[in-house]
Image (cartoon, rainbow, N blue to C red):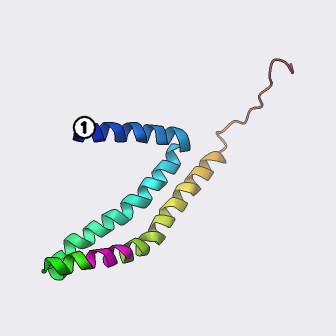
Amino acid sequence: MTYFILYFSGIGLIWWVYRVGWIEVLKTILSVLIPSFLIILFNVKAGRLIFKNPAVGIISVLPTAIFIYRGSKPLVFGINSWIDRKRNEFVKSEEVVEAEVVSKEEA
């Protein structure tokens, strides 16, 4: 069953890259993975202190996740801005040659 999920996820990822481009996919994936990683890291590190009681842990996971998600927005925005700057620097590069296309009917 896991292989089917991975297979369909891979096909979906390939289709998504085809539709919007790999840079936009990378930015979207990073905007999801960075807060998720920070939330998991916080819950693992602080779990021994905060979540000794399972009921308190379940109740406090959602508020901490919201705070960490909102707190990580500047980091995600900075990384996405850096990716956009690098993309714009590449487009404005001197190595890029602009060409004009002339159809056969016009020639």
Principal SS element in the magenta part? helix
Query: Residue type at mark 1?
Result: Tyr
Q: Residue at x 17, y 79 (%)?
A: 55
- Local packing at callout 1 (Cα closer than 10 Å; few below 14, some 14-19, many 20+) is few
Is residue 46 something that shows in the picture? no
Closer-to-camera residue (55/47): 55
Closer-to-camera residue (37/5): 5
Image x and y of residue 44, in percent: 20, 70
Name of the residue lying farthest toward the right: 106
Image x and y of residue 3, in percent: 24, 37
Q: Is residue 105 left or right of residue 49?
A: right
User: Quadrant of the rendered structure where residue 14 is?
Assistant: top left
Q: Secondary structure at mark 1?
A: helix
Closer-to-camera residue (80/16): 16
Q: Residue at x 67, y 48 (%)?
A: 92
**58 magenta-colored:** no
Q: Residue at x 69, y 36 (%)?
A: 97
Image x and y of residue 20, in percent: 55, 44
Image x and y of residue 5, in percent: 29, 41
Q: Is residue 81 left or right of residue 53?
A: right
Find the magenta span and give its range: 60-66
Closer-to-camera residue (90/35): 35
The residue beneath circle 1 is: 3
